[in-house]
Image (cartoon, helix red, strand yellow):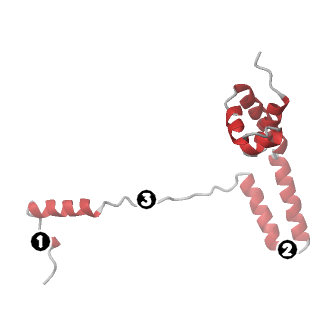
Amino acid sequence: MGKQVSVKERLFARYVAEGRTQAQSARMAGYASNPDKKGSELVKKPEVVDLINQRGAELAEDRAVSLREHLDTLAALRDDARDAGQYSSAIQAEHHRGKASRLYVEQQVVAKADMDSPTVILERLNGLLSRGAPDALDAPD
């Protein structure tokens, strides 16, 4: 079995899992002297890390919103907005219901311009000129 974890270490793990910094968590857990250093030390202890992960998973589960609850809430908001004559808000709520249900697919196109440096361009031009390239590079008269 793993090492015993003190009450302070348990408190520290809980505070870190809730999103506080290591120093804040150490201070709140009762480590008054040098909380920055103590926080760094504590997150290196496997049993404390396990507690942080365990508490983090519990919090995530508690805060999780089911898709059904989310869609029902949006539907109720849509209906309330429609009944109040706020059609723009009703449409927006319905649109968000569709997005949550994955009825819409957002597409993004990322164009990457692969530009050569001026030195590379000059080297290519000089290479063309030295091979006797056509006079296409000459300026018109």
Residue type for callout 1: Asp
Q: Can you tell which of label 2 and label 3 is closer to the viewer? A: 3
Q: Give the image quarter of residue 1.
A: top right
Q: Position of residue 18 (x, y in %)?
A: 79, 43
First in sequence: mark 2 vs mark 3: 2
Along the line of sight, the residue nearer the viewer: 65 or 2: 2
Residue type for callout 3: Lys
Distance from label 1 to label 3 (Cα)?
32 Å
Quadrant showing the C terminus: bottom left
Query: Dot 1: few (<14), some (14–19), or many (≥20) neighbours within 10 Å?
Result: few
Which residue position holds label 2? 86
Q: Can you tell which of label 2 and label 1 is closer to the viewer? A: 1
Picture residue at 11% right of the left edge, 68% below the top: 134
Which residue position holds label 1? 135
Picture residue at 70% right of the left edge, 52% below the top: 102
Picture residue at 37% right of the left edge, 58% below the top: 114
Distance from label 2 to label 1 (Cα)?
68 Å
Distance from label 2 to label 3 (Cα)?
42 Å
Marking on residue 112: 3
First in sequence: mark 2 vs mark 1: 2
